[in-house]
Amino acid sequence: METVTLRSWPFGLVVMTHVYLLFLVLHVPITERTRHSCNVLHRDLKPQNLLINRDLSWSRHTNSLAKKARQRLYHLRRLRDFRLPSKVLWNFYTCTIESILTGNITVWFGNSTKQDRQAFQRVVHSAERITHTELPDLQTIYYKRCQTKARKIVKDLTHPNNRLFTLLRQFLFVVTFTTFLFNCVEYDVLFANRAVNHTGQSLNLLDRSKVTLPDAILPSQQCMERIQGNSWIIFLLIMAAIFWIYRLGKVICNVLSYWEIRQFYIKALKIRMDELCNFSWQEVQVRLISLQREQQMCIHKKELTELDIYHRILRFKNYTVAMINKSLLPVRLHLPFLGDVVFLTQGLKYNFELILFWGPGSLFQNKWNLHPKYKRAGNRLELARQLSRIILLAGVANLLLCPFVLVWQVLYAFFSYAEVIKREPGSLGARRWSLYGRLYLRHFNELDHELQGRLGRGYKPAARYMNAFVSPLLAVLARNVAFFSGSILAVLIALTVYDEDVLTVQHILTAITVLGVVITITRSFIPDEHMVWCPEQLLQCVLAHIHYMPDHWKGSAHKSETRDEMAQLFQYKAVFILEELLSPIVTPFILIFLLRNKSLEIIDFFRNFTVEVVGVGDICSFAQMDIRRHGNPQWMSEGQTEASVYQQAENGKTELSLMHFTLKNPRWQPPQDSSFFISHVREKVQQDAQGGPSPQLLLSEAPLCTSLLSNESATTAPDSLLASVLAHPILTAPGAAARSRHCASSGSVTSAAASVLASLPSSQQPHAGRTSHHHHHHYHHHLESATYHSERAVANSMSASDSKLIGQSSSALLSEFASAEMSLHAIYMHEVHQQKFQSQHGPGQFQPTVPMRDFADSSDKYDSITYHGWGFMMPEGYAIFHKLF
């Protein structure tokens, strides 16, 4: 047999020969056989291995650690024989023995047996006798490590489990503090209803009658007697403790899950935690797809696509978005005197998900597969009755827990917002995107950070549109109330400045606080005197970012009905708090009286719109964005779709979602029907661009055009360049500044949008699967040409360690440009849709919402061909982005 040799190279590098590699390969199966013969289930590939037995115990792992530690005690004894100081012996023990015993201790020590812990403790005692010092036991080290990890999570606001730890801490504080206020405070003393007389020789007459804070707090023994004597308080504390333990268990599970994700990013994707914040999602996705090709993580598919990854992450959210789109979930209520209102809270959403996705008796048997019985149409009525019973039980459970949840909601809202309201009373008048609005405006296959970024960009335009509606009568009343309140407040402040004894007058501080709150609230009703009234233009600015709006909003932006419907998507924070407070009361009735009636429609929905994808599992068919099956002829897919009215997605959800996903993932290869739709949109853009103004003319009229067209603009950093293009004044009218400030017509907006899109390089590229490789290089060529000058300007001033940020800035710039291009496509597609609809039904008409009904045929299959996405667009075309408004 040939001798195994190792060739030494400079710097200590060792190169294995072919024979040695063959030797290692032959011993791999032998090692695996030995491992399984020892009942070892898992061996983690780290310097300190984790061994788990088949019975999920840690005995083999703990025995291995104890054996290694006992072996190293020999070296510790030898050092003692050389009469080294105890400090040196302690350092040696900490570095060579304790490091072995405590390796990954937070993972395995909590589940180790008493016998294992005794074996470790014997090692520690032996080390103590050798070093003649007291050493910490492993139980203490385990507690300290867990506490240190928890503190790090609490301090790290970007940690996924930070919110869970915060909720645990807040819940514990609310329960403890509320119990203290009800049982441990003497309110008669606090409100001076009972006199207090302090005794002591050192106290003068005034100090003896002065009330201090300890006087109003009962002693701990008396406080405990009050709590023990109130059975109702004890019952509430027991319920709170059960809920807190449940949340603690959930936190522990999330921490373990986070640890697995962290290890996957570090070892598999080669991304360190300190560098993760500098990586874009597209870069992480590229590494994940490359890893699948190398290591075959998913055994059912050779390669994963971008759409497969999104389907795995957004499986249940795509179902929820589709049910909101088809008006299946009962979130719209008709109330007397209030009319149609939308009610969707966190509690109601939690119950929907519990019943449909992951709760006991839900439709899914695990996280990736729908139960087989729901895929068959034979017993749909029986399944509907079964689902109705589950919904009834959930509603009754919510009704029984309503008092406890309501108390918690009130206390949590009070402790959360009381200080904020005192500091900034106007914060309740701020707006936020409602939970219903986030689901209504969400594309299929849109990640949370993508949705948050898009709605964040649309926040200011939406706020300007909502603030444009002002009641003259309310404005006059607000001005007068603010004037009277301000006058009284000014007098009170002047008196307190003159003599501070005024503050001792009863209720004077209360009056000052109330007057300040009244002034802040009334100012929010006073309009800006420089505001220009053009609601159609403002609403179009909102559409550029939210991408969806009902058909009847077009031409009706000035109506209060449109504003009220927009308020359902963009609600006041005070309305959000009120809805969450009412949620424990309203949720049971929605489940019992509304959701139960839709049991059969829900069963039919999941049967008709669930498809199985190899390597992914069961997903919502709407999430595949198949134009042939779910396209809407009114949204530029006429002649390309075979979908019935029941199968069509409303409001162009399929078409806009396909466009959004294609722009965000340019390497994705869509199916053939989707490819034809994108080509059709491109041809339509080229046709409309021929009758529109030239991009050069629009660019010359746009603000900042001089800096964009000059040579110096090439050295502008990508972030500042993008900000200068997109941060266009909202109230600038379409066209040159000399034109009158009127809203643009539908035809002018369509032609202008088409001209901009046609001027982009991506609009001039044909899209076919056979040329995807060529377009891939062309795509990156435009990226490099768009960012070359800006990168070269900063590269000379950057060190070698910072040069990697250049590629990351290019990725961020690409994402911003894709978002802006999607905004142009949203405007263009809405305008074309409006023109087509008005030509068929006449102006002033809009398409009604189609109710859900049974549809049994769900056997359509999906084909796929290779296809390349949209190319990269140059920043030059975006100088006129806001000129369309």
Image: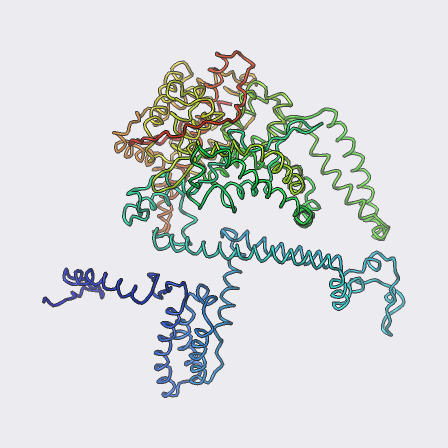
- Model colouring: rainbow
Q: In which quarter of the image is residue 488?
A: top right
Q: How many marks?
A: 0
Q: In which quarter of the image is the N terminus?
A: bottom left
- Residue 178, percent across and down? 71, 56
Is there any visible trace of residue 445 in the rendered image? yes
Residue at the extreme left? 1
Specify whether 119 is left or right of 496.
left
The residue at the point 35 percent across, 61 percent down is 42
Residue 756: percent from the left, percent from the top? 41, 23
| Residue 414 visible from this viewpoint | no
Observer-nearest of 73 and 525:
73
Residue 334 horizontal/vertical position (percent): 65, 28
Residue 224 is drawn in which quadrant? bottom right
| In-front residue for pair 195/104 | 104
Q: Is residue 122 left or right of residue 218?
A: left
Q: In this view, does 857 lie to the left or right of 727?
A: left
Q: Position of residue 867 (x, y in %)?
A: 30, 31
